[in-house]
Image: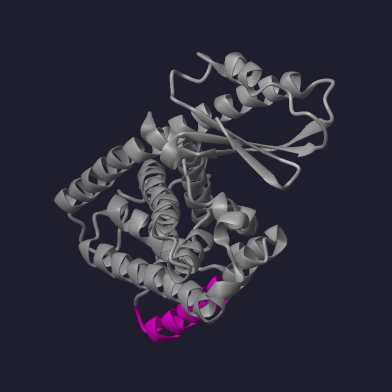
Amino acid sequence: MWKSIGTLIHGGTVNKTHVERIRDLVLYEGSELKNKLVKFFLLLIFSSGIATYGLLGDSVAVIIGAMIIAPLMLPIMGLAYSISAGDIKAMKNSLLLSLGGIIAAIAVGFILTLPMNSLFQPENINQILIRTSPGLIDLLAALVTGFAGAFAMSRSDVSDTLPGVAIAISLVPPLANVGILLATFNYSLALGSFLLFVTNYLAILVTGAALFGIMGYSRVTILEKSSNAKRNGLIVVLISLIVITVPLGYNGYNVVTDNSITQTVNNASTEWLEGSGYELQSINILSSNNTVVVKIIGNGPLPPIEKLQEQVKGKIYGKNIKLEVVYSDTYLLNT
């Protein structure tokens, strides 16, 4: 059954011509190795630079441009193909190249940001911040993207969709983000951004290797293959993916909890301020000390703070929430 499904997906039976094409596309080997490496690292440096400035400038369009020219997907897909084919040498080469690309992308973000790190506050830049707290949804999106990438690369008749796949696969921006956050001494945020990259990396490996295998690339190979290498490679990637779901699930739980708290406090604050000379400006959650900061703007007598406390009591998952109300941009009232 799987063979028939693979043939249908691939659009025909995989033969050595198809294998040669995919190896030439995703593996860095042969007489053109030097030229391929030069092209890879130049494109990686350019895309990392574009991503760095796009992130610092909070520009979605610039970041998308960096995604389109980023070449990091190729060695990752090369590793996925190598695992499906059990090609030990290609596995090592693809892994080393992707690791070199990871280090280079982080270094570019760090070097470009360091001279002006005092000019930016990353925690206030949306495009930087949204890449520091991945959840299970990011994993699911990366799994589907891995299938799309392997499918697009394996069939020449749909290769024009590769730019779209490159945009969907968030690889270089999270790495440039890591460099930015390291240069601005935001180490915990940098770790979160690196977790996003690792999530995408492992998901692409799992689904890419699976689809290459289903389509038949694991049954047709030019070089001698090792079934043990194939099995061991898949086991390592799957275990890593399972392990990484723990922090992703934790992050996802925190996001859902924070959203619920924000909604509860927003509704309570709106009701609390009704008829007063104040209006709600923002609600921020400081997870480090379980504090909800409610900022309001206005003039006149402040409604009794006890009423707001009573409205949120028992509705915030039993957490000991401290409310800080800032009003008139001048006074700070802690409760």
Please indicate, yes or no, whether residue 116 appears anywhere in the rendered image.
Answer: yes
Please indicate, yes or no, whether residue 14 appears anywhere in the rendered image.
Answer: no
Q: In front: 66, or 1?
A: 66
- In which quadrant of the rendered image does the C terminus lie? top right
Q: How far from the left and from the top, in percent, is residue 104?
A: 42, 75
Q: How far from the left and from the top, in percent, is residue 269?
A: 69, 24
Identify whether 292 is placed above or below 122. above
Q: How far from the left and from the top, in percent, is residue 88?
A: 21, 62
The residue that appears at 65% across and 60% down in the rendered structure is: 64
The single residue placed furthest to the front in the displayed view is 301
Identify whether 318 is placed above or below 189. above
The residue that appears at 29% across and 37% down in the rendered structure is: 242
The single residue placed furthest to the left in the displayed view is 228
Is 158 a magenta residue? no
- In which quadrant of the rendered image does the N terminus lie? top left
Identify whether 236 is placed above or below 255. below
- How many marks do you count on the picture? 0
Q: How far from the left and from the top, in percent, is residue 167?
A: 61, 56
The residue that appears at 46% across and 74% down in the rendered structure is: 110
Q: In front: 328, or 40?
A: 328
Q: In front: 85, or 197?
A: 197
Relative to 256, 127 lies left or right: right
Residue span colored magenta: 30-48
The residue that appears at 53% across and 53% down in the rendered structure is: 169
Chief secondary structure of the magenta portion: helix
Residue 5 position by quadrant: top left
Relative to 126, 20 lies left or right: left
Is 42 a magenta residue? yes
Residue 90 position by quadrant: bottom left
